Image: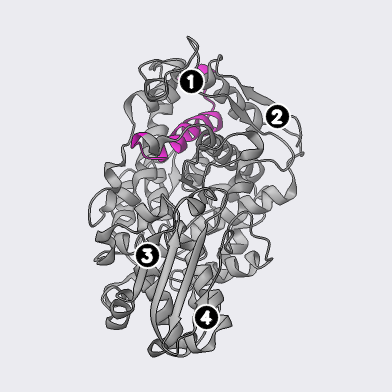
């Protein structure tokens, strides 16, 4: 591992340090970032855009509402662009609209905040929902694609490293706060904010805009769950603009004893924060390399079960032939997955937001597709938006299969393997008395530690499926988004200028 060029000790002003890091890293002229990091970044970005375009084309509520709102705030100067629009909007409005679209399907990248090599294993979740902040900052600041790529990488590095050292979920705070802090740093740097102004913006975010996990509670989830990152990103951009106008926010927020970090985890030493923070600036050891892809629409905690079922379908033809050939399927998994997607209310999901967080629904739908298509591969069984529409939600075969699925906590032996992996086991009892077991699945396809070599082709399949019903030329969209380092200032400004079906402006 190359030397860490930015070590922000707990006895330092880390908000000030994050501002310096963002300004230095984004505007560095060196080329010492490993090409595989850039490749991974571009894949996560395209993944997020494909999810966002699909959500808009299929009429998802929150993205449409927020996009319409953004286009009520068009501006002739200093604006950024919503997906599929040629009208520049106020940047915070473009950000909230695009980030909401990106997150709506809950299908883009995920981090688990687990890095034993750095002894940073707090295990906070997070997602690649914040690229619209970097794009808006580049459009407002007049930057080219190379600068934009470094800004995206910087944003993921900050929020990813924060997720490794502080577990917001332990205090019922939504993980998007880490992304909001990173957004303030990156957007501020891109738009010419000083270090002090960026520190003020970060202080404003933490002091005024802490989102609690109430947005994720309830039997049937609301628009607030999917739009959480978007609303926090919007707040971060507003805080930057406010700070640039001269508003002074709380300084040194990570060491502030009344802010969330020291309040929930009082440091042992006075005037320190609860953690050290190390940020990469070269080589391959970036936080993004530990983030995971979802190969379809599903809660990431279910990826191990999906992999296990696909493996079993391929190995045991009677299981794949007809649902009449088996009587019981048991899934064993770790906490917190069992608590998140095993909630008894999730056995009867009635909205997409609840269904994609229901293990029994996800697996039953996967099996229904297998029996209808008589196919068993990832490519054919990949879950898409249509698998969560009203017809799918209440499909009689899906509901019947759900009744035969038993979902249980696997106990301490499963818990200790998370979050290094996604430890899951699926056992199937066939009607002829045969018992089939997947064994322990740790690193399903899409997981950062999976080495089966199929990621690129499955990601392309996902992009194709999501874009097929959203744009006329899916290949043109992906080609436009690859190779960002070669894009000019004007090409960055027009990055999201593609027509989306069902949108008239």
Q: Secondary structure at mark 1?
A: helix
Q: In the image, residue 474 lies at what x, y percent?
A: 54, 70
C-beta proximity under 8 Å, tags 4 and 1:
no
Q: Which residues are magenta?
A: 171-199
Taking depth in this image into account, of 147 and 217 the one nearest to the observer is: 217
Q: Mark 2 or 4, which is nearer the eye?
A: 4
Image height of 40 relative to 364, above or below? above
Q: Which residue is mark 1?
A: 199
Left/right placement of residue 218 relative to residue 316 reads left
Taking depth in this image into account, of 118 and 442 the one nearest to the observer is: 442
Left/right placement of residue 495 relative to residue 391 reads right
Q: In the image, residue 414 lies at what x, y percent?
A: 50, 54
Q: Which residue is mark 4?
A: 313
> Would you say residue 87 is visible in this rendering?
no
The numbered mark, 4 or 1, whose residue comes first in the sequence reads 1
Circle 2 packing at 10 Å, graded few (<14), some (14-19), many (20+), is few
Taking depth in this image into account, of 84 and 380 the one nearest to the observer is: 380
Main SS category, magenta section: helix
Q: Which residue is mark 2?
A: 4
The quadrant the N terminus occupies is: top right
């Amino acid at each position: 591992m190359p030397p860490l060029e930015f070590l922000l000790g707990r006895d330092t002003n880390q908000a000030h340090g994050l501002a310096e890091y963002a300004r230095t890293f984004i505007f560095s002229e060196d080329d010492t970032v490993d090409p595989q990091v850039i490749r991974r970044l571009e894949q996560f970005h395209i993944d997020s855009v494909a999810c966002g375009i699909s959500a808009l084309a299929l009429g998802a509520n929150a993205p449409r509402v927020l996009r319409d709102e953004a286009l009520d705030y068009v501006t002739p100067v200093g604006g950024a662009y919503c997906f599929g629009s040629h009208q520049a909007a106020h940047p915070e409005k473009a950000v909230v609209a695009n980030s909401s679209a990106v997150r709506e399907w809950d299908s883009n990248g995920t981090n688990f905040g687990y890095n034993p090599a750095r002894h940073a294993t707090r295990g906070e979740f997070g997602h690649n929902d914040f690229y619209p902040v970097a794009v808006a900052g580049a459009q407002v600041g007049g930057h080219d694609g190379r600068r934009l790529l470094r800004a995206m990488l910087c944003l993921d590095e900050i929020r990813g490293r924060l997720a490794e050292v502080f577990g917001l979920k332990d205090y019922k705070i939504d993980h998007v706060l880490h992304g909001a802090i990173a957004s303030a740093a990156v957007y501020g740097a891109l738009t010419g904010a000083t270090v002090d102004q960026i520190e003020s913006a970060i202080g404003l975010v933490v002091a005024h805009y802490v989102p609690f996990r109430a947005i994720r509670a309830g039997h049937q989830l609301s628009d607030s769950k999917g739009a959480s990152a978007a609303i926090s990103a919007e707040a971060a951009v507003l805080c930057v603009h406010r700070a640039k106008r001269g508003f002074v926010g709380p300084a040194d927020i990570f060491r502030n004893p009344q802010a969330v970090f020291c309040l929930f985890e009082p440091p042992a030493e006075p005037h320190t924060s609860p953690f050290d923070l190390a940020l990469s600036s070269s080589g391959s050891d970036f936080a993004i390399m530990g983030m995971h892809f979802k190969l379809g629409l599903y809660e990431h905690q279910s990826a191990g079960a999906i992999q296990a079922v696909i493996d079993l379908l391929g190995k045991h033809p009677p299981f794949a032939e007809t649902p009449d050939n088996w009587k019981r399927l048991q899934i064993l998994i770790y906490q917190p997955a069992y608590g998140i997607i095993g909630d008894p209310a999730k056995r009867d999901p009635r909205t997409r937001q609840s269904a994609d967080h229901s293990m029994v629904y996800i697996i039953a739908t996967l099996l229904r597709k297998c029996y209808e298509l008589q196919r068993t591969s990832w490519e054919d069984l990949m879950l898409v938006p249509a698998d969560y529409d009203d017809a799918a939600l209440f499909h009689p075969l899906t509901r019947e299969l759900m009744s035969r699925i038993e979902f249980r906590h696997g106990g301490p032996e499963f818990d200790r393997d998370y979050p290094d992996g996604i430890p899951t086991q699926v056992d199937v009892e066939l009607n002829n008395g045969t018992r089939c077991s997947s064994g322990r699945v740790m690193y399903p396809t899409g997981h950062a530690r999976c080495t089966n070599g199929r990621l690129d082709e499955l990601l392309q399949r996902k992009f194709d499926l999501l874009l097929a019903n959203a744009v006329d030329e899916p290949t043109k969209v992906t080609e436009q988004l690859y190779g960002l380092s070669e894009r000019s200032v004007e090409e960055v400004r027009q990055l999201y200028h593609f027509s989306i079906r069902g949108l008239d402006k």
